[in-house]
Image (cartoon, rainbow, N blue to C red):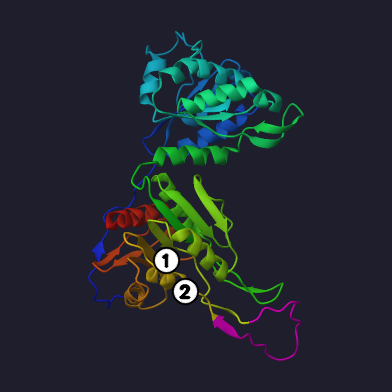
Amino acid sequence: MTENNKETIERATVKTVVKTTGKTVVLGVCGGIAAYKVAYVASALTQAGVDVHVIMTKNATEFISPMTFETLTANRVIVDTFDRNFQWDVKHVSLAKKADLFVIAPATANMIAKMAYGIADDMLSTTVLAASCKKLVFPAMNTGMYNNPATQRNIDILKNDGMFIFEPASGYLACGDVGAGRLPEPDKITECVKFFLNSDNTLKGKKVLVTAGATREAIDPVRYITNHSTGKMGYAIARRAAEMGAQVVLVSGQTNLEAPFGVEKIDIVSARDMFEAVKEHGKDCDIIVKAAAVADYRPKTVADQKIKKSEGDAFIDLERTDDILKYLGEHKKKGQVICGFSMETENLLENSRKKLDKKNADMIAANSIRQKGAGFASDTNIVTLITRDGAEELECMDKYDVADIILKRLADMM
C-alpha cells in the first residue's frame, strides 16, 4: 500500500485465529519398538502449545523411559493404575474428561484387542474406556500380526465404535519382515493430531476446490517457463478447508510440499493441465479459491529436441494461456463463491478491483510482492481482501491464519 492511496480500508482485528494452544492430548504409548518415535510427537505437540499427558503400558517402559516423556511434556507420566507416590486423583477419569483428543501410538495388537472388547486391566486401557473424546489409533506390529483375521476383525470393531484407525506404513520391520506394520513417521502423526484438534464444522457438507503452486510451460524437453511460487498459501487454504469439514480437492502445480491431511490432491504441470482439472472438478464445488501462480503465456510451439545454443539472440513466440478465473466467472453456478488471488507490484487496489469485476469473482485476495512479510516462499502474508462491498486489509500473519480468515469470509458470502 502506498502512502497516498486514498482508499478506505476496513482493518481486520483478528491476528491469530486457530491454534492448538490450550488443547489437551492424552498420548497412549504401548510396548513396541516404534515407541521411540512417539517421543518426537510429544515434543512437537508440546512446542505447538498442546498440553500432552502420556500414559504408558508397563511393556512400553522397556523400550523408552517415562522420564523421556516427562522431560519433553513437563507432565508426570502415568504407568501404574495404583501409583501411591502421586497426588491423589482418579486419573483414569480426570484425564479422560480433560482430553480434547486421545492418541494411541504405537497401538499393539494386544491393546487393539482390549479396546475392541472393553477390557480395562491397566491404566491405558482403563482411561481409553472412560474417555468420550475422539480417539486416533496408529497400529504398529509385525505384518503377520497386523494381517491376522483376529486383528483385522478387532480393527473393524473399533472403526464401527467411531475410532479413527490409521493404516500403518509398509516397509522393512524390526523383526526382519517386510510388509505393513510400520508406525508412520512422527511428522505424519503430528499433522493428523493437529488436524483433529483444529477441526470444526464451518464448511461441513461443502465442496472446496483450491489451486496452488507454479505451472510449467515447456520450451523443449529440457527447458520451461515458470515462476517463484512455492504453493504455501494455497496449501494452507486447502488444509484449513479440510479442517473446517469440507471435501477438498487441491489442484497443484510444482511445489515441494506434501498434500495436507484429508485433502485429495491432483498434480498438474502446465496451465492447460490446470484449466482442464479445474473444469472437471470445479463445476460441483461450493467454493473455489484460485491461489496458484498460473503462467499467462506459453510457447506457441514446443521443440521435440533440445534447442542447441547458437550465436546471437534467441526469440520464443508466445501465446496466451487459458484464463481459468475468467472461465470460472463466466460459468459460475448459483450459490457458488469464487476467490482469486492478485499479486501486484503497483496500484494494488486499482488493479485488483479491475480483476474482481472483469473475472466476475466474489473476492480477490491481493498482495504486493514488495511488502516485507508477503509474497513468494514466505511463511507469512499480507493480504487485502477485496469484494464489491469494500476492502479489508489484514495484518502480517501466518499463511494458515490468512487462510482461516479467507475461508470464513467466503463461508459468510454463501
Instruction: Answer whether labels 1 and 2 touch (C-beta < 8 Å).
Output: no
Identified by mark 1, the residue type is Lys
Residue 300 lies, in percent from the top left, at 61, 82
Image: 35 above or below 302:
above
Quadrant housing residue 132: top left
Upstream in sequence: badge 1 or badge 2: 2
Quarter that holds the C terminus:
bottom left
Residue drawn at x 60%, y 32% is 37
Q: What's drawn in magenta, residue-wise?
A: 301-319
Residue 89 lies, in percent from the top left, at 37, 13
Task: Give 399 or 221, whichever is nearer the viewer.
Answer: 221
Task: Give 91 or 150, whichever is nearer the viewer.
Answer: 150
Quadrant housing residue 389: bottom left
Image: 291 above or below 60:
below
Q: Which label is found at residue 79?
A: none
Task: Give 4 or 239, whichever is nearer the viewer.
Answer: 239
Question: Image check: 313 left or right of 374?
Answer: right
Question: Most prominent secondary structure in the magenta stretch?
Answer: loop
Query: Which residue has dot 1 on it?
Result: 372
Query: Which residue has dot 2 on it?
Result: 323
* Mark 2 crowdedness (10 Å alpha carbons): few <14, some 14-19, many ≥20: some
